[in-house]
Amino acid sequence: MAVLFTANITQAQTVQKKKIGEYPVFSLAPYGGIQFPMGSLGETYKSSFNAGLDVNMKINKETSFFLNAGYYDMPLKSDRTGPAASFIAITAGPRYVFSSASVKAKFFLEAGLGVYIFGLKEHTTTVAPIVTTPSSSTVNFGLNTGPGVVIPVSDAMDILMKSKLHYVLNADGSSTFISASIGLDFKL
């Protein structure tokens, strides 16, 4: 009886250690893509590139948390005059993963909130009088949400694809843009 009791305790401790070692899982994903300004932002600025870095902490099979830093270029449309712009976003939030044993890819939905730094670049007029406007920036609160997919490539790396709707609150109302990105997700 003592042997069975000891064997059962040893097995329970082994299983518990395995579960503790499995989560959390950290990953780092550099990415790049394209952004599409919408609404009043889309009237002034055109689509361009975005780039950034996702840090992800998976706490169980379905749930993880991300911290994201992204740069979104906003070049001026050719029929407009004025400075070009950009957003730098630093956001964090939860990610819910929909997984199935029969499908290797993992679909997810994430939502984040944080700061969006809107920067206007230095601009010099081309007609008289020539005026140079210095660069400036404003910090605003913003939200983002969107779907994505993680495609396994190896034990150490996955392909990460996602699209997001960004909603930035500012003194004049709000600014909205959509981003689509692809990157490599490295497990740490």
Image (cartoon, rainbow, N blue to C red):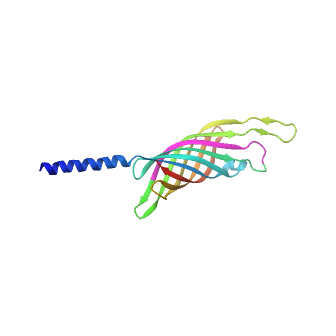
In screen coordinates, is 61 left or right of 123?
A: left
Query: Extreme right residue here?
Result: 128
Q: Nearer the viewer, residue 175 or 1?
A: 1
Dominant secondary structure of the magenta stretch?
strand
Q: Position of residue 60 (x, y in %)?
A: 39, 50
Q: Residue at x 71, y 49 (%)?
A: 43
As displayed, is residue 25 above or below residue 131? below
In screen coordinates, is 187 left or right of 139?
A: left
In screen coordinates, is 154 left or right of 82?
A: left
Q: Position of residue 27 (x, y in %)?
A: 48, 48
Q: Please tell me in which quadrant of the rendered image residue 134 appears.
A: top right
Inspect the magenta stretch and tell me whether residue 47 lies in it.
no
Query: Extreme bottom residue here?
Result: 102
The segment highlighted magenta reads 80-96
Do we see residue 37 in this rendering?
no
Do we see residue 99 in this rendering?
yes
Q: Nearer the viewer, residue 172 or 24?
A: 24
Looking at the rendered structure, the number of numbered marks drawn on it comes to 0
As displayed, is residue 46 above or below residue 141? below
Q: Please tell me in which quadrant of the rendered image residue 123 appears.
A: top right
In screen coordinates, is 88 left or right of 107?
A: right
Q: Residue at x 73, y 44 (%)?
A: 84
As displayed, is residue 87 above or below residue 178? above
Inspect the magenta stretch and tell me whether residue 93 lies in it.
yes
Q: Nearer the viewer, residue 142 or 72?
A: 72
Q: Position of residue 65 (x, y in %)?
A: 46, 46
